Amino acid sequence: MGSDRLQQWLLRAGLVISAVLLIRFAIDFSEEMKWWLAAPFCLLVIVALAVGMANVVGGPTSKYDTPHRDAKPALLLAAIPLGFLASSLDCMGLSLQGCSPFCTFVKLAWIPLLAIACAISYFVGKRAWLTAIAAMSFLPLFPHCICYNVGNAWWIDRIGASPLCYGWGFVVSVIAVSALRRGDRLSASIVTCGAIITGATGFFVAHHYFQFPW
């Protein structure tokens, strides 16, 4: 399997996994939260999946084989480790230790490795680095979270641990890598990734410092 075909397969699999995680989360969130909290959350889920699908479906429209020195690729690549970091802050806050050793490993080791891969991709510009980033983004989805909350409860009740902890970070990665692969819809992808990261960061502050919404 060539690098481009592998990349396409990873992104399509990532889109399906993103849909499963986000739709399940949206259902549980809507059942437990007030409508004025659930409505914007569900809207973000719909927009994220729509942008991801638009990016993933079809082949690449540009060759990502040369270094890019403009702002949009830089923002998309930066959004990937930031998305995972925001997800980790939602779970463990500023603590260096998560609810499980795997969670701690992702925050302290895997996210920095992803950041390095994204930096290399920006300066080198080879498509193989996008494939590596897409593949690396799957590891944080290994079911490990044991924080019993609205998003994780359904998974913990069935398989003992949740894969959702870094779910929003994974969605950011799928959107960003697929946008760079295609070479279009960069602005829409940046806005969507930014909304996800902003929302996750807002939840981190509200949850850990104001115990809201739980």
Image: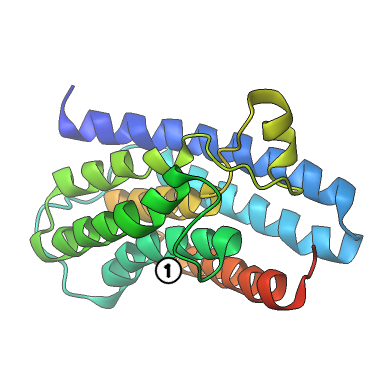
Residue lying at 25% horizontally and 30% vertically, measured from the top left:
6
**Could you tell me which quadrant the N terminus lies in?**
top left
Residue 60 image position (x, y, % from top left): 28, 43
79 relative to 1 in the view: left or right: right
Front residue (pair 69, 173): 173
Residue furthest out toward the top: 1
Tag 1 secondary structure: helix
Residue 210, above or below 171 = below
Residues packed near mark 1 inside 10 Å, few (<14), some (14 to 19) or many (20 plus)? some
Residue 143, above or below 192 = above
Residue lying at 40% horizontally and 57% vertically, measured from the top left:
107
Colour scheme = rainbow
Total numbered labels placed on residues in the image = 1
Disc 1 residue type?
A: Ser
Residue 184 visible in image = no
The residue where tag 1 is placed is: 187
Residue lying at 15% horizontally and 27% vertically, measured from the top left:
2
Front residue (pair 186, 167): 167
| The quadrant where residue 3 appears | top left
**Could you tell me which quadrant the C terminus lies in?**
bottom right
Residue 154 visible in image = yes
Residue 68 image position (x, y, % from top left): 16, 67
Residue 151 image position (x, y, % from top left): 71, 46
